[in-house]
Image (cartoon, rainbow, N blue to C red):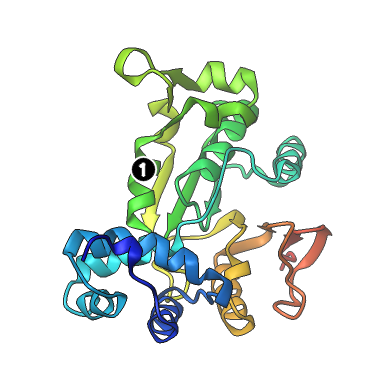
Amino acid sequence: MSSATAISLSDQEFAQFRQLIYDIAGISLSEAKKPLVAGRLSKRLREFALASYGDYFRLLHQNPAELQICVDLLTTNETYFFREPKHFDFLRERLGQPGLVPSGRPLRIWSGACSSGEEPYSIALLLADVLGDKPWEILASDISQRVLERARAGVYDLQDSENIPRHMLVRHCFRGVGANEGTLLIDPALRRRVRFEQINLNNALPEIGQFDVIFLRNVMIYFDGDTKRQVVKRLLGRLRPGGYFIISHSESLNGIDDTLKTVKPSIYRNPDV
């Protein structure tokens, strides 16, 4: 075998990986994702000197650690700081009005599919800017342990910071020098207020408490209708009365949930009891 890149992924093998990732993460891969699956897994074939994707699939049933790597590779999505800025404009507006920020306890926000951390750190930068020393905390979760490790480190390419407002960048980020030139580090004081946890939204949720705002953006596009309904129901069980549920502009809750009240496109409110 000269290179795993020369190995083709058969339709039958692709079907096996599609079923695997659906069973584990609830993600429905379309036929158009076949090249992506082949490309992301090709390095693992080289790593184990395997002759086919079928051999790799069989290996997954014998190697739980490799199964986690496979899931990580097939579920990692693109993200960046302050993506879909209207959501952050809305949050800033609500933080300046009575009602959202509680008295006697921290404001709690959950980033439900945080990937490599840009979304929860964007939220954290905004909260630090608006609330200052008032109590707040963020839970950031993802199914991929690999991206969570990167998120916890809080180190990003400097070019990724272009959407961070300059005053936030100066106050809460450090520019790398020497061997770290070309990178930025999120201030450790800010990172300590963001807790990263591996959570599979397709399973029963752990005991994580209730939240005032839940972000579930750019993940439901990979779910079928039944999975969307189950995931949204689980998360709404963690949303406080009067809290906000925010999804991507490319997603919709039509036919998924009829209990939330639409505030703006892609922004919903849990009715008060």
Residue 264 higher or lower than 122, as above or below: below
Q: Position of residue 204 (x, y in %)?
A: 43, 76
Which quarter of the image is occupied by the N terminus? bottom left
Q: Is residue 105 visible?
A: no
Residue, far front: 2
Which residue: 40% across, 34% down?
154
The residue under label 1 is 150
Q: Position of residue 85 (x, y in %)?
A: 72, 41
Q: Nearer the viewer, residue 169 or 206?
A: 169
* Amino acid type, label 1: Arg
Q: Position of residue 107 (x, y in %)?
A: 57, 45
Along the horizontal axis of the image, is 57 left or right of 222?
left
Which quarter of the image is occupied by the C terminus? bottom right
Q: Nearer the viewer, residue 96 or 150?
A: 150
Which residue: 60% across, 80% down?
224
Q: Is residue 53 visible?
A: yes
Q: Quadrant of residue 89?
A: top right
Q: Label 1, secondary structure: give it.
A: helix
Q: Position of residue 252 (x, y in %)?
A: 74, 68
Q: Nearer the viewer, residue 236 or 170?
A: 170
Which residue: 63% across, 19% down?
166
Along the horizontal axis of the image, is 249 left or right of 164?
right
